[in-house]
Image (spheres, rainbow, N blue to C red):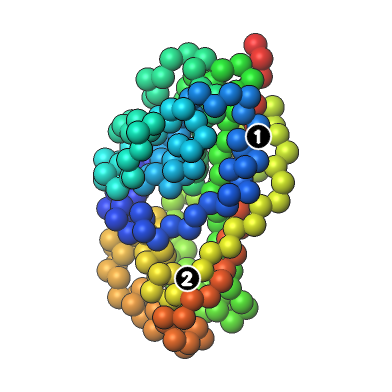
């Protein structure tokens, strides 16, 4: 069963997470022979759903968290519901695209693959994408690593390693499609950056156990190398993606 580690910070998650590159969506939609129906599992606050709604006649967007669904933007051609990724109510051979963003590593993959293979049309496209760490410059990166992430090393769930390894060690039951290099820049001031860090699962787990004083202290220490916390700086996220096509039976 999928894990729900994001309900408690759904509001923060909705406003702080980076936007996925348009280049990725342009590539992804080119792979789809039809644009009638897309299913997005673990849609969260609907970040990727916005792009999907502009291309597909109907988008079914599901998430395990009611709080995340409550923070998702409504669209006339999007049907939101609370449902585990492994348990879709969609008809067999109905989807042109099945996808998930920043969530595949939380799923029960054997069950999920069974569901995806059932609902995808023959030749339909499956895609998963997300991001790892963002980078500014050597001084800021080193300070963030020591102040924000070093103290919480033991708080990350083991599932995160699948993403950190860029999904390379997942056995995808699809015909792989080569994906071009995708850049993922994003600008933050220091307040926005720390709101983003606060929304991460490992940080949330640590805060639940030890309180958030560590994060307040980290903010002040990172500020010494950042400068004015209102100044926006550009970072680049490591974009992670997989795209494949359902094999014809």
Which image quarter: residue 168? top right
Q: Position of residue 43 (x, y in %)?
A: 41, 40
Q: Position of residue 152 (x, y in %)?
A: 43, 65
Q: Say if 108 sits above or below 15 in the image.
A: above
Instruction: Indicate which disc residue 30 carries.
Output: 1
Task: State the residue at coordinates (55%, 56%).
Answer: 132
Q: Do the residues labelled 2 and 1 touch (CB within 8 Å)?
A: no
Instruction: Indicate which disc residue 188 carries.
Output: 2
Q: Say if 162 sits above or below 1 in the image.
A: below
Decide if residue 45 is on the left or right side of residue 146: left
Q: Say if 86 sits above or below 186 in the image.
A: above
Task: State the residue at coordinates (46%, 81%).
Answer: 231
Residue 17 can be seen, yes or no: yes
Task: State the residue at coordinates (27%, 69%).
Answer: 211
Compare marks 2 and 1 and give the one earlier in the sequence: 1
Q: Where is residue 66 in the image (x, y as percent from the top left)?
A: 26, 40
Viewer-nearest of labels 2 and 1? Answer: 1
Tag 2, which secondary structure? strand
């Amino acid at each position: 069963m999928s894990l729900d580690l994001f309900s408690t910070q759904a509001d923060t998650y909705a406003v702080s997470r980076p936007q996925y590159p348009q280049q990725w969506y342009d590539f992804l939609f080119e792979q789809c022979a039809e644009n009638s129906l897309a299913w997005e599992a673990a849609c969260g606050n609907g970040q990727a759903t916005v792009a999907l709604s502009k291309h597909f006649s109907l988008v079914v967007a599901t998430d395990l968290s009611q709080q995340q669904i409550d923070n998702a933007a409504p669209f006339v051609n999007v049907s939101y519901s609370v449902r585990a990724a492994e348990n879709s109510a969609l008809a067999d051979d109905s989807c042109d695209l099945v996808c998930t963003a920043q969530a595949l590593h939380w799923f029960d993959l054997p069950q999920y693959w069974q569901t995806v293979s059932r609902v995808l049309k023959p030749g339909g496209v499956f895609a998963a994408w997300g991001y790892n760490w963002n980078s500014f410059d050597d001084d800021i990166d080193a300070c963030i690593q020591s102040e924000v992430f070093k103290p919480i090393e033991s708080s990350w769930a083991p599932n995160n390693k699948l993403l950190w390894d860029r999904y390379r060690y997942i056995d995808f039951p699809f015909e792989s499609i080569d994906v071009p290099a995708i850049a993922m820049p994003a600008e933050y001031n220091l307040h926005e950056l720390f709101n983003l860090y606060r929304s991460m699962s490992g940080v949330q787990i640590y805060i639940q156990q030890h309180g958030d004083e560590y994060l307040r202290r980290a903010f002040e220490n990172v500020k010494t190398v950042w400068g004015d916390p209102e100044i926006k700086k550009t970072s680049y996220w490591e974009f992670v993606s997989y795209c494949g096509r359902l094999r014809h039976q």
